[in-house]
Amino acid sequence: MPDRLPHDDPDDLVVLLDDDHRPIGTAPRHGVHGTDTPLHLAFSCYLVDGKGRVLLTRRALGKRSWPGVWTNSFCGHPRPGEDLVDAVSRHGRGELGLEPEAIRPVLPDFAYRAVDASGVVENEVCPVFVARTSDDVEPHPDEVEEHRWVDVSDLRETVRVAPWALSPWLVEQAAAMEEADAWHVLAPDETETRP
């Protein structure tokens, strides 16, 4: 498999943010996640197929944080000055070997902080996107251990009964989707505006 990870450049930078979520600088991506991770910009994306199923991925076992944990389709960090939709496309190609389509925000102001068992902290302003795909999933093994298409109702039930089996950001995003009554955006025929 050719190396197509979207973030292999050791000079890749993430955008640091202040408490009001305004950019204040950059930091090397490889060094930003630790026990004292600064607030920075990221994104999450949920891919939906033509049947309205959501792609869940299990993080690769070699990942530094939350290895082997089931999560949303993919996450990533935009580069300084990069449009978030462009970053979603870049990571979809790099991590899953597919082209996300009809990308749109569903939780544009989502932010969270979580600490994994090893002490690594995620501290992100992380807008959540939904995208469509009809492509086959070809996950990069450094990113994804396995993947599964699931019905939205099954995802919601898993979050309810077994949140410990999922990434903390997926659980928090699901709660925010419930609060915003936003699960409808995952319907296979959802258009830009809700009827």
Image (spheres, grey):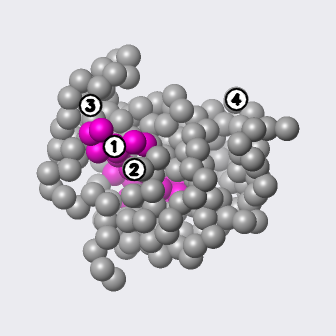
Q: CA distance from mark 2 to mark 3?
A: 16 Å
Quadrant of the image occupied by residue 126:
top left
Q: CA distance from mark 4 to mark 1?
A: 30 Å
Q: Is residue 187 above or below residue 82?
A: below
Q: Is residue 24 above or below residue 155?
A: above
| Among the two numbered marks 4 and 2 on one chain, the one whose residue lies closer to the N terminus | 2
Which label lies toward us, 4 or 2? 2
Local packing at callout 3 (Cα closer than 10 Å; few below 14, some 14-19, many 20+) is many
In the image, 178: left or right of 10? right
Location of mark 1 (residue) = 82
| Among the two numbered marks 4 and 1 on one chain, the one whose residue lies closer to the N terminus | 1
User: Which residue is at the far right?
Assistant: 195
In the rendered structure, which segment of residues is drawn in magenta?
65-84
Q: Position of residue 67 (x, y in %)?
A: 38, 59
Residue contact between numbered discs 4 and 2, judged by CB atoms under 8 Å: no
Q: Is residue 71 above or below residue 104?
A: below
User: Which residue is at the far left?
Assistant: 11
Location of mark 4 (residue) = 179
Location of mark 2 (residue) = 87
Q: CA distance from mark 4 to mark 2?
A: 27 Å
Local packing at callout 1 (Cα closer than 10 Å; few below 14, some 14-19, many 20+) is few
| Among the two numbered marks 3 and 1 on one chain, the one whose residue lies closer to the N terminus | 3
**Callout 2: SS:** helix
| Among the two numbered marks 2 and 3 on one chain, the one whose residue lies closer to the N terminus | 3
Location of mark 3 (residue) = 16
Residue type, label 1: Glu
Residue contact between numbered discs 1 and 2, judged by CB atoms under 8 Å: yes
**Callout 3: SS:** strand
Quadrant of the image occupied by residue 108:
top right
